[in-house]
């Protein structure tokens, strides 16, 4: 049993498996379809639907790429969380990459 399952503390079925055991494969990857399902599976209370990126340039690009990579690993959907960015007139005029990557 993994550390995640020990902390989960769900009810066990006749095979001794928790709900968590049944959705984790042999490599300990969680297999859920949506952020809501992910949060409920791990006993969370609040689903993150949007993230404000209050930075610009390469820092904003790296942040969005990192989060999207994690979303692909867990949910197989890099667009499961939307990105909102703060934009300067100069960046808007230059059509900066972080603006093109944003959703809203």
Image: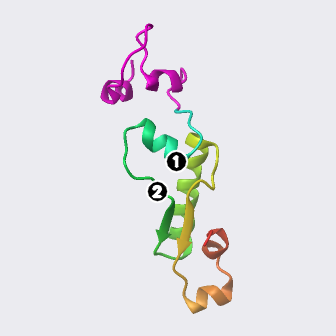
Question: Is residue 52 something that shows in the picture?
Answer: yes
- Above or below for 31 versus 47: above
Residue at screen point 59% across, 91% down: 90
Q: How far from the left and from the top, in percent, is residue 51?
A: 49, 65
Q: Determine if the magenta segment contains residue 45.
A: no
10 Å crowding of disc 2: few (<14), some (14-19), many (20+): few
The disc, 1 or 2, on the residue closer to the chain's N-terminal end is 1
The disc placed on residue 72 is none
Residue 24 visible in the snapshot: no
For residue 55, above or below residue 8: below
The magenta segment: 1-29
Vertical placement of residue 10 versus 40, above or below: above
Q: Position of residue 58 (x, y in %)?
A: 55, 70
- For the point 36% across and 25% down, which residue is it? 10
The quadrant of the image that shows the N terminus is top left
In the picture provided, is 8 more to the left or to the right than 29? left
Image x and y of residue 28, in percent: 49, 27
Q: Residue at x 43, y 13 (%)?
A: 13
SS under mark 2 = loop
Indicate which disc residue 48 carries. Answer: 2
Whether residues under marks 1 and 2 lie with C-beta atoms below 8 angstroms apart, the answer is yes
Q: Distance from label 1 to label 2 (Cα)?
A: 7 Å
Q: Residue at x 56, y 37 (%)?
A: 32
The residue that label 1 is drawn on is: 35
Q: Quadrant of residue 81?
A: bottom right
Is 3 within the magenta? yes
């Amino acid at each position: 049993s993994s550390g995640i399952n020990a902390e989960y503390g769900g009810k066990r079925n006749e095979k001794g498996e928790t709900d968590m055991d049944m959705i984790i494969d042999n490599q300990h990857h969680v297999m859920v379809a949506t952020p809501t399902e992910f949060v409920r599976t791990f006993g969370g209370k609040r689903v993150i639907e949007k993230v404000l990126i209050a930075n610009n340039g390469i820092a904003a690009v790296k942040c969005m790429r990192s989060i999207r990579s994690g979303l692909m690993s867990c949910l197989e959907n890099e667009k499961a969380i939307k990105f909102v960015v703060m934009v300067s007139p100069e960046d808007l005029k230059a059509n900066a990459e972080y603006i093109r990557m944003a959703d809203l």
